[in-house]
Image (cartoon, rainbow, N blue to C red):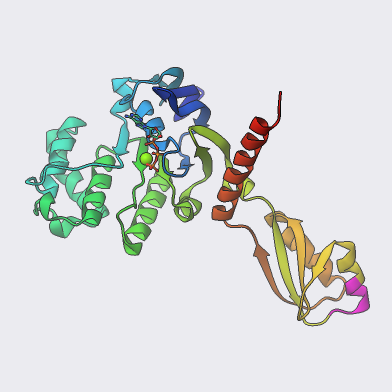
C-alpha cells in the first residue's frame, strides 16, 4: 500500500473580506517529516493550521490530512495541536487540564494516569502537577500546552510558535522534545518566525509571506551553496596558480575563499589542494544563515512584485 502524505494542500485559499490571508497554497508534508512553516507576523501561518484542523473554513481549494478530507473526525483524533494563543481554566491544576483533554481524545480511563504522568515529566512539569494553572508562569503554561498536544501519541502534531514564551533552557527542551518526536516517527508541523529554531530541527521548510508560499524545500537547498575559507601555512607559486584556476578570492594572512561549493565538495577540494603540496591549517564553511536567506527570499519577492506593478502591461 502506498502511504498517503501526512498532509497535502491544493490551492488552499482563505479570504477575510477583501484581504487574502492565504492564497493558492499547494504543498505536501510526508509522514515522519519535521516541517517548518516560516513567515513574518501576519503571513498566514496560523490561518493555514486552522484550516487544516477544520477550525476555519477555506474560501477555496482543498486539503487532505492523514489521507482524509478536511474536517474528518477520524483524522482529528490522530492529531495533536498547540494553539498560539490559549488559556486554560485558571482554577484547574496541570494534571486536571491534562485529564480533561485525555478524556476528549478518548484515552482509555485506566491508561490516563500513567500517560499523564509521563507527559508531565516530558514537559518538565512533574513537580508542579498539582498546582493551579492560574499560578503558572507563561513558560509553564506553554509547556502545559505542549503536553496537551502530546496526549494520545498523535501521528501528526501542529505546534504554533511553541517557544514564544520560553527561556533559552525551555527552547532547548522543546528542541529535544521535537527531536524525540522525530525519532519516534511523528510528523511535526512547526509554525515559527524564529528562524534559528527551525534551522535546528526541521528537514524541510516553506517560507510564507502575505499568504503565499515563496519557497519550499530542503533546508540545505534553501540555504544554498557556500564559500570555503581555507588557511594555509604558506602559498607557493604552484599552489597560487592552482587556487587562481579555482576562482579563489585571496585574503590576508594566507587565507583564501573558494566560492560556490556544497558539503559534498569539501573532501575533494582539500585532497586536491593537498596534492599540490598545500599544508592546510583550517577549513571553514561560510554560509549565509537561514535568517539572511529568509530576508533575501522576502526581499527578492517584494522586488519582483514592485517590478510587476511598475512595468506597464
Ligand atoms: N478572523 C479573522 N478575521 C479577519 N482577518 C483575519 C482573521 N484571522 C486572521 N486574519 C488576517 O489574516 C492574516 C494572516 O493571519 P495569521 O494569524 O494567519 O498570520 P500568522 O502568520 O500566524 O502571524 P503571526 O506570526 O503574527 O502569528 C492577517 O492579515 C490577519 O489579520
Ligand atoms: Mg500565528
**Residue beneath the point at 35% across and 63% down:** 168
Looking at this view, is 147 or 306 the one in front? 306
Q: Residue at x 85, y 62 (%)?
A: 246
Query: Main structural element of the magenta stretch: helix, strand or loop?
Result: helix
What x and y, as percent, mark residue 72? 32, 20
Say if 91 sits above or below 282 in the image.
above
Q: In the image, is residue 124 above or below residue 219?
A: below
Q: Is 244 one of the magenta-colored residues?
A: no
Residue 38's place in the image compared with 197, above or below, is above
Measured from the top left, where is residue 124 in percent x and y?
24, 57
307 or 172, which lies in front?
307
Residue 151 position within the rendered picture, expressed as x and y whole percent measured from the top left: 24, 40
* The quadrant where residue 286 appears: bottom right
Ligand 1 image position (quadrant):
top left
Residue 149 x/y as whole percent: 28, 40
The foreground one among 126 and 52 is 52
Q: Which residues are magenta?
A: 235-240
Left or right: residue 105 versus residue 167 is: left
The image quarter in which residue 100 lies:
top left
Q: Pick whichever, 14 or 30, lies toward us.
A: 14
Amino acid at each position: 500500500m502506498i502511504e498517503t502524505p501526512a498532509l497535502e494542500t491544493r490551492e488552499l485559499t482563505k479570504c477575510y473580506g477583501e484581504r487574502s490571508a492565504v492564497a493558492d497554497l499547494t504543498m505536501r508534508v510526508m509522514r515522519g517529516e519535521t516541517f517548518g512553516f516560516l513567515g513574518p507576523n501576519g503571513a498566514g501561518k496560523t490561518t493555514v493550521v486552522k484550516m487544516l484542523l477544520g477550525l476555519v473554513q477555506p474560501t477555496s481549494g482543498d486539503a487532505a490530512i492523514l489521507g482524509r478530507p478536511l474536517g474528518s473526525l477520524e483524522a482529528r483524533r490522530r492529531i495533536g495541536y498547540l494553539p498560539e494563543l490559549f488559556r486554560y481554566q485558571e482554577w484547574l491544576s496541570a494534571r486536571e487540564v491534562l485529564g480533561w483533554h485525555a478524556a476528549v481524545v478518548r484515552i482509555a480511563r485506566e491508561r490516563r494516569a500513567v500517560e499523564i504522568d509521563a507527559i508531565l515529566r516530558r514537559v518538565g512539569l512533574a513537580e508542579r502537577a498539582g498546582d493551579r494553572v492560574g499560578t503558572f508562569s507563561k513558560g509553564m503554561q506553554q509547556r502545559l500546552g505542549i503536553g496537551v498536544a502530546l496526549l494520545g501519541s498523535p501521528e501528526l502534531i501542529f505546534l504554533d510558535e511553541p517557544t514564544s514564551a520560553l527561556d533559552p533552557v525551555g527552547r532547548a527542551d522543546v528542541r529535544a522534545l521535537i527531536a524525540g518526536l522525530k525519532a519516534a516517527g511523528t510528523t511535526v508541523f512547526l509554525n515559527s518566525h524564529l528562524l534559528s529554531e527551525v534551522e535546528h530541527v526541521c528537514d524541510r521548510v516553506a517560507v510564507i509571506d502575505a499568504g503565499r508560499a515563496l519557497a519550499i524545500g530542503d533546508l540545505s537547498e534553501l540555504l544554498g551553496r557556500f564559500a570555503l575559507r581555507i588557511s594555509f601555512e604558506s602559498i607557493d607559486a604552484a599552489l597560487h596558480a592552482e587556487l587562481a584556476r579555482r576562482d579563489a578570492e585571496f585574503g590576508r594572512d594566507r587565507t583564501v575563499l573558494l566560492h560556490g561549493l556544497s558539503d559534498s565538495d569539501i573532501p575533494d577540494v582539500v585532497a586536491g589542494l593537498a596534492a599540490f603540496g598545500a599544508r592546510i591549517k583550517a577549513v571553514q564553511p561560510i554560509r549565509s544563515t537561514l535568517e539572511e536567506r529568509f530576508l533575501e527570499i522576502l526581499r527578492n519577492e517584494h522586488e519582483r512584485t514592485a517590478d510587476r506593478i511598475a512595468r506597464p502591461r
